[in-house]
Image: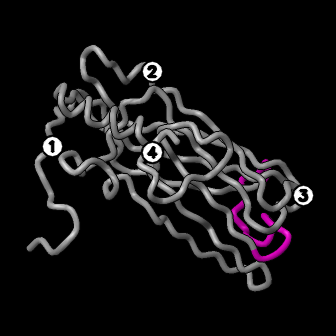
Amino acid sequence: MFIGGRQPQVSMATAKTGSFYLTETITLPAASAGGTRVQGVIDLGAYVNVATGQAVAIDQVDFVWQGGDTFFTLANSMVTADASLSMQLTDLNPGSAFVRADNQSLIASGAMNIDFTNNVVSRSIDLYPDNFGPAALSEAFMVVNDSLYLVGGTDSTAVTGAAALACTVRIRARVVKLSSKDWMAIAIQSTASDN
């Protein structure tokens, strides 16, 4: 039974490959001040082709935070007080800023909240690739741009001076062929998001 929201529809995309993974890691330097943002870029030029209607379908996005040369995950060794480590993946370049949740270029986002005193961590992924794509292609987020952008940073509290923090994004994707109509619709939507 469908209740509210977007009516699911069959995709016009034809898979050209099975699933594969793309990764990118950004590094927040030790002692970075609260509000610091860092950006990384994933090149999709080998996968996206305008002439043939080839695009990238993103099925899943996972974010992982680790610290120092030993890749530790102890929360109160990452920051100096209560904090949030936030991250976003987009298909348009936001620089080192975050975009608002209604931006059509936003693929996935989330945060890791750290209760420093109690060494308690809670994670939330507040936007998944499958719930913000074009309606007719909503089983995945379709990308027709030639790059993805990972932005991550600390909110309100500094990174500990002892070690840098790394945020890695793991993206499960497929190369797909879109009809000319669908490719153009996604390109127009993507361009409209470029504010």
Over which residues does the magenta segment extend?
A: 68-82
Judged from this view, the residue extending furthest toward the top is 51
**Could you tell whether 43 is left or right of 127 in the image?**
right
Residue drawn at 56 percent across, 52 percent down: 99
Q: Which residue is mark 1?
A: 11
* Image spot of residue 28 (x, y percent): 77, 49
Nearer to us: label 4 or label 2? 4
Q: Is residue 83 magenta?
A: no
Residue drawn at 44 percent across, 57 percent down: 102
Q: Which amino acid does the dot numbered 2 rest on?
A: Gly
Q: Are marks 4 and 3 in contact (CB under 8 Å)?
A: no
- Where is residue 20, by image quadrant? top left
Q: Which residue is mark 4?
A: 105
Q: Which residue is mark 3?
A: 162
* Image spot of residue 115 (x, y percent): 72, 80
* Image spot of residue 160 (x, y percent): 86, 62
- Mark 4: give few (<14), some (14-19) or many (20+) Cα within 10 Å: many
Q: Secondary structure at mark 4?
A: loop
Residue drawn at 32 percent across, 19 percent down: 50
188 in relation to 160, above or below: above
Q: Which amino acid does the dot numbered 3 rest on?
A: Ala
Which SS type dominates the magenta stretch? Answer: loop
Nearer to us: label 4 or label 3? 4
Q: Which residue is mark 2?
A: 45
- Mark 3: give few (<14), some (14-19) or many (20+) Cα within 10 Å: some
Judged from this view, the residue extending furthest toward the bottom is 118
* Image spot of residue 51 (x, y percent): 28, 14
